[in-house]
Image: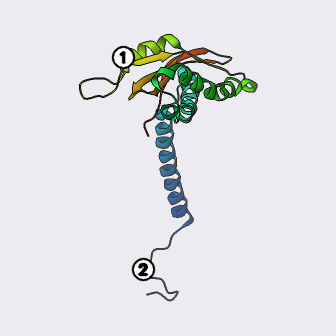
Amino acid sequence: MTENGTCGTHRSSPTDRGQLVLVAAVALAAALVVLGFAYLQLGYSDDIAAGTVEPAHGIETTLNRSVHNASTDVPAAYGWDERTTGAATVRERLNATIETLNVARLQDGHAYDVSYNRTHAIRWGADNCPAGPNRQFDACDAVDGVVVQDRNGRTHVLGVAVDIRITTPETETTVTTVIERRAE
């Protein structure tokens, strides 16, 4: 040990410290370059369809809740011979939600138009009506866009067929779908 309390005889000079700082700066620069390339590889490509699918999904989510709420008491309130009135009740209950959706984003330049699709309801009911040897359900019927089924003489709502038209300053898209009633 030396008189000043250090071990050994090597003393660092300002040149040594400068070289160490230079090596650290080069290593940091190399790491930043690698991070920059990784960031660029993540990439961002503007997807025009994404702008319209997202609102359509949001509208469908809102309609899912509304169809469920509008049709919950239909089996208890309407027999199969009253299915037209039951379907009209569901439509009437959905009207407030549809009117709200249709004006929801007008201030942003987006126009939504949700309307019933009677033809799609007929096709969907024919293709998706629960039936078969292990089912105790009767026929399905489409009444003004509302698909109903006879179950023990009661009207059960299976779904509501709608067209969702989304118009923005850039594009117009139409989605046709059936909002199926969730099972309880």
Q: Is mark 1 on a helix, strand or loop?
A: helix
Q: Where is residue 93 in the image (x, y as percent from the top left)?
A: 62, 29
Toward the bottom, the furthest residue is: 3
Q: Judge by depth and name the residue closer to the eye, 160 or 134.
A: 134
Q: What element carries label 2?
A: loop
Q: Quadrant of the N terminus?
A: bottom left
Please count the marks in the image: 2
Toward the left, the furthest residue is: 133
**Residue type (three-letter) at the residue carrying disc 2:** Gly
Q: Along the polypeptide, which appears first: circle 2 or circle 1?
A: 2
Task: Identify the image quadrant of residue 48.
Answer: top right
**Label 1: which residue?**
127
**Label 2: which residue?**
8
Q: Quadrant of the C terminus?
A: top left
Q: Judge by depth and name the residue closer to the eye, 94 or 34.
A: 94
**Residue type (three-letter) at the residue carrying disc 1:** Asp
Whole-angstrom CA distance, mark 2 to mark 1, is 90 Å
Mark 1 crowdedness (10 Å alpha carbons): few <14, some 14-19, many ≥20: few
Left or right side of 69 for 157: left
